[in-house]
Image (cartoon, rainbow, N blue to C red):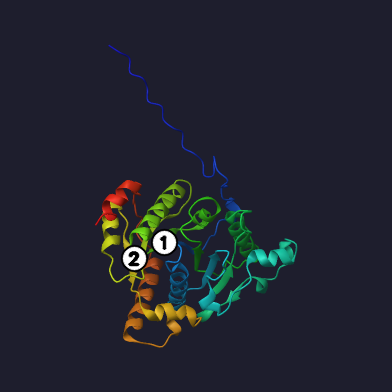
Amino acid sequence: MNAVTPVKTRPSRADGEGSLQVHLDPTMKIEGAKVFAVYGKGGIGKSTTSSNLSVAFSKIGKRVLQIGCDPKHDSTFTLTKRLMPTVIDVLEQVNFHAEELRVEDFVFEGYNGVMCVEAGGPPAGTGCGGYVVGQTVKLLKEHRLLDDTDVVIFDVLGDVVCGGFASPLQHADRGLVVAANDFDSIFAMNRIVAAIAAKAKNYDVRLGGVIANRSAGVDQIERYNAASGMRTLAHFPDLDAIRRSRLKKATLFEMERSPELDKVCESYIELAENLWKGTDILEAKPLKDREIFDLLGFD
């Protein structure tokens, strides 16, 4: 009888091992606030979604801090009505002597009391987005700005879920995905689902679900949800008022009212309330690329 060759198992890999990522310094952990990291395909409306969700949290009485993680530094544009300087900008002005910075140099109050920070990003082709996020959280903790915060929302660059721009997941309780009802958005969502699952092995972050945006229907998203175990948290239609809100430097809660817009604002309030109460942990599994093509790509 032939001897059975034992199966070799691959040892689990610590976060950052074999890459340029670094493990989170325990002293930099955000405590006392519920933290959400918002990801999604580039141009899908993450900043609009994040800003209106921040306002919704503030409308239910929560103290909110929104952190934009994009070199464009326009995450909080509709909240503050202007492009704010980034943390990297102000650090550069003091030759990276962080002790010389004042709170008002990098934290600005937006609509309905939402506090706003733009982390920015490293110069193109150099540096690491993780360093930028890390320096931002470090400054916030040093100035004790997180002590009086109930909700932190990270609005993260595009669908980049590798390297430094995955670092907000080290701080988050829930990872949220913004997606439209189309193949490219769902393909990006699948990558984000995989990234959150990887980070969940070493950190407290768990999947929250998908926010359907700019979509008349959600049939394709629901097909993906059924196959992967994801869930839809909210659905926002492709209203012209939502597009115009960016042009007017306004959140949806400041726009001229209409029955359609009232319904959207009510949905944001409902989403904020549900996220504050806490969502059940999802055990979603990312699909293989071929599986997504077979599921959605050949209709």
Q: What's the residue at 32%, 56% (across, down)?
A: 230
Crowding at dot 2, Cα within 10 Å, few <14 / some 14-19 / many 20+, comes out as some
Q: Going from the N terminus, do you reach mark 2 or mark 1 first?
A: 1
Given residues 79 and 30, the one toward you in this image is 79
Dividing the picture into quarters, in which one does residue 281 lie? bottom left
SS of the residue under disc 2: strand
Tags 2 and 1 touching, CB below 8 Å? yes
Q: What's the residue at 45%, 84% (across, down)?
A: 254
Where residue 222 appears, as percent x and y from the top left, is 27, 60
Relative placement, left or right, of 172 versus 93 is left
Q: Quadrant of the C terminus?
A: bottom left
Q: Amino acid at mark 1?
A: Leu
Where residue 217 appears, as percent x and y from the top left, is 28, 69
For the residues labelled 2 and 1, the Cα–Cα distance comes to 9 Å
Dividing the picture into quarters, in which one does residue 209 lie? bottom left
- Determine if residue 201 is in view: yes
Relative placement, left or right, of 96 versus 291 is right
Given residues 290 and 14, the one toward you in this image is 290
Where residue 229 appears, as percent x and y from the top left, is 30, 53
Q: What's the residue at 32%, 80% (across, down)?
A: 263
Where residue 189 appears, as percent x and y from the top left, is 39, 57
Crowding at dot 1, Cα within 10 Å, few <14 / some 14-19 / many 20+, comes out as many
Q: Which residue is mark 1?
A: 176
Furthest residue toward left: 299
Q: Which residue is mark 2?
A: 233
Given residues 61 and 124, the one toward you in this image is 124
